[in-house]
Amino acid sequence: MVVPHELHPLFQVSKVKQHQPLQVQAALFLLLLTGASHAQCRLLLQVNHRMIEGMSSRLQVLRQSYVQEEEQKIIFGDGKKWMDVEADEATFDRADVTRDVTYKDSVVKGKPILWEQWCGILARGNPKTLVLTCLTPVRQNSTWSNPQGGLDPIGPEASCRSQTHFAR
């Protein structure tokens, strides 16, 4: 038997007892699009939390792939004249990786601090051209301090070099 949502990236077909019909899956999809919480979806539709989490994660993957495709189409400038762009960076997390075996080489070199930094670039006045890139800042030792003294809450400056497409 072939069903309309066979091999669909968001909706699922299943023969298990907890399977939900396409109508319930579509209702859940619309609730997630409107920003309803998982608890609200569960109360309204009387479905298992695993179904809600599964569809939410599949929706995030679809959004991510769409954004990555659209970012590849964004080109800053035409190669003939300058274009005003705005760029900024932000630091969101400072992690001590002394006990993480993945970063063993950094800990041995005395640099156990890992920063999560992001850079955003957009054409001035055009928010649809926003391109976000995760930076790879240099790992620091745990005693790195700022000129005013004490540990720097923001961390070292990282250059905003990314895979952003500029017209050449």
Image (cartoon, grey):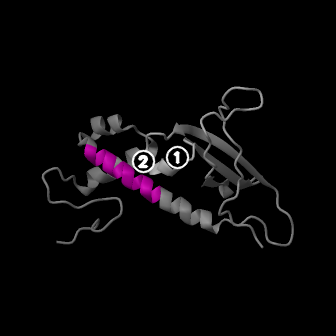
Residue type, label 1: Val
Magenta residues? 50-63
The residue singled out by tag 1 in the image is 108
Q: Is residue 159 visible?
A: yes
Residue shown at 29%/65% (left/top)?
5
Closest to the observer, 26 or 81: 81
Quadrant for the C terminus in the image: bottom right
Q: Which residue is mark 2?
A: 101
The answer to which quarter of the image holds residue 32 is top left
Where does the image place residue 106, in percent across and percent down from the top left? 54, 48
Mark 1 surroundings: few (<14), some (14-19) or many (≥20) residues within 10 A: few
In x, y percent, where is residue 95? 53, 38
* Residue depicted at x 23% and y 68%: 3
- Indicate the quadrant containing the N terminus: top left, top right, bottom left or bottom right: bottom left
Amino acid type, label 2: Val
> Horizontal placement of 59 versus 69: left or right?
left
Q: Are marks 1 and 2 in contact (CB under 8 Å)?
A: no
Q: Residue furthest right?
A: 81
Q: Main secondary structure of the magenta part?
A: helix
